Structure formats: C-alpha cells, structure tokens
Image: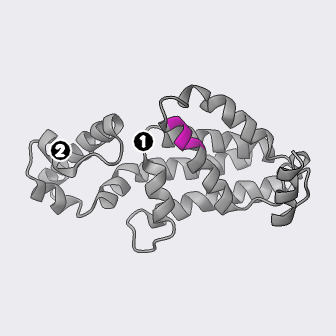
C-alpha cells in the first residue's frame, strides 16, 4: 500500500473509531465518510462492508485480548485467569456499543470479515475455561460457546443506559456461578434445568 493510501486508510479508521464510539456499530457508513471528508465510494474502496471496517478497526484489540489470555495463563491461577479475562473482555466490548451482536452473528458465518477474529477470541476463552475446569475452578457444564455468550450478555447490559450502573454487580453475580459449587443441580442440560427449578 502506498504511503498516501495508508494515510487515508488510517484516517478513515480514526474517524470510524470516534463515530462508532459515539453512536455504536450501526452508525451510517455515509456519515463516517462525511466526517472523514471523503466520498462514500472512497470509504467502500478501502472497506467494502461494515464488517470489513470493523475487522480492521478491532483486529488489534482482538489480538490484544488473545495475547492477554496467554499472559494470564502463565501468571494467574486457572480460576483467577478465567474471571479476569472475562471481565476485561466484557469491558472492551462496551467501548463499541452493539459490537457483540455482530460478533455473535459473525462467529457462525464463515464468510464474515469478523469470523476469524471472533473464532480466535472464543478459542482463547475456551482454553482458559478448560484450564480452570481441569483445576476444579470452573463448573464442567460450561463450554467455550457459552462463555462467549456470557461475554455478549454482560456486554449488552453495559449498552443499556438504565442497566449499565448495575453491570459491575451483575458481572460479579455471574462470575460467582462459575465455580463448581454453583452447579447445585448437577451437570449437563438436565442438571441446569433442575438447578434452576430448585432455586
């Protein structure tokens, strides 16, 4: 990429980051182009789809969260590493309102520009979960897909103005249910139903 083209691309990403931070991931691409003082065709030449723009914008954060999982795996106890990574992952997703909706869809769509990054992130979380489970620090009826769903759920709370003040407390409630002792109804789908019914 020529220096001028890279400069234009970096400028578009900077403007997009500000716009998405203010309005969420549904911000109009035309509005981003207007803010960047370029035509929509120029924006689409660099980023043909909204997901391509988001992938370019978020890829560094995805890599940082994946690297953070590796770091925690080496420096913290299995249970502590899992909860710390989960908390940091949720905190990151709240920076871009609505991004978890796109991530949840992209992880099931191999054609999505976000697919590979989302799968990598889910794999990092699943590895921390499996490590905690092996050490007895996490209930056995969770898997990587459900952990990813927890991130989406908790991030959604942070996106709701009326619920955001409660997001930290609710994270602690969810995190307290991860240890095996929380699985009062046993393991597996039937155990989850029984546990819920039994209060």
| Circle on res. 15 | none
Residue at left 85%, top 52%?
197
| Image quarter hosting the C terminus | top right
Task: Determine which of the numbered discs, if any, sits on residue 31 in the image.
Answer: 2
User: In the image, is residue 180 above or below residue 95?
Assistant: below
Q: Where is residue 76 in the image (x, y as percent from the top left)?
A: 76, 41
- Residue at the far front in the pictured view: 197
> What residue lies at 54% left-to-right and 64% top-to-bottom?
119
Q: Is mark 2 on a helix, strand or loop?
A: helix
The residue at the far top in this view is: 165
Q: Is residue 196 left or right of residue 81?
A: right
Query: Magenta segment, which residues?
Result: 154-158
Principal secondary structure, stretch drawn in magenta? helix
Q: Which of 66 and 168 is in front in this view?
A: 168
N-term mark: 1 or 2: 2
Q: Can residue 184 be seen in this view?
A: yes
**Can you identify the residue that label 1 sits on?**
97
Where is residue 70 shown, x and y percent of the image? 65, 51
Q: Is residue 162 above or below residue 72?
A: above
Magenta stretch containing residue 51, yes or no? no
Residue 75 visible? The answer is no
């Amino acid at each position: 990429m020529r220096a001028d083209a890279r400069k234009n691309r970096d400028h578009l990403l900077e403007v997009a980051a500000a716009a998405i931070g203010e309005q969420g991931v549904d911000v109009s691409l035309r509005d981003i182009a207007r803010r960047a003082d370029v035509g929509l065709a120029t924006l689409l030449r660099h980023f043909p789809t909204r997901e391509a723009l988001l992938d370019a914008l978020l890829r560094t954060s995805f890599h940082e969260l994946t690297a953070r999982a590796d770091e925690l795996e080496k420096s913290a106890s299995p249970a502590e590493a899992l909860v710390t990574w989960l908390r940091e992952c949720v905190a990151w997703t709240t920076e871009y309102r609505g991004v978890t909706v796109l991530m949840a869809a992209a992880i099931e769509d191999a054609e999505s520009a976000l697919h590979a990054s989302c799968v990598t992130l889910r794999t990092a979380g699943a590895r921390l979960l499996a490590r905690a489970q092996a050490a007895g620090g996490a209930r056995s009826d969770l898997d990587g897909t459900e952990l990813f769903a927890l991130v989406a759920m908790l991030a959604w709370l942070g996106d709701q103005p009326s619920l955001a003040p409660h997001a930290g407390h609710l994270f602690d409630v969810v995190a307290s249910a991860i240890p095996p002792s929380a699985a009062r109804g046993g393991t597996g789908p039937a155990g989850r139903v029984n546990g819920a019914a039994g209060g």
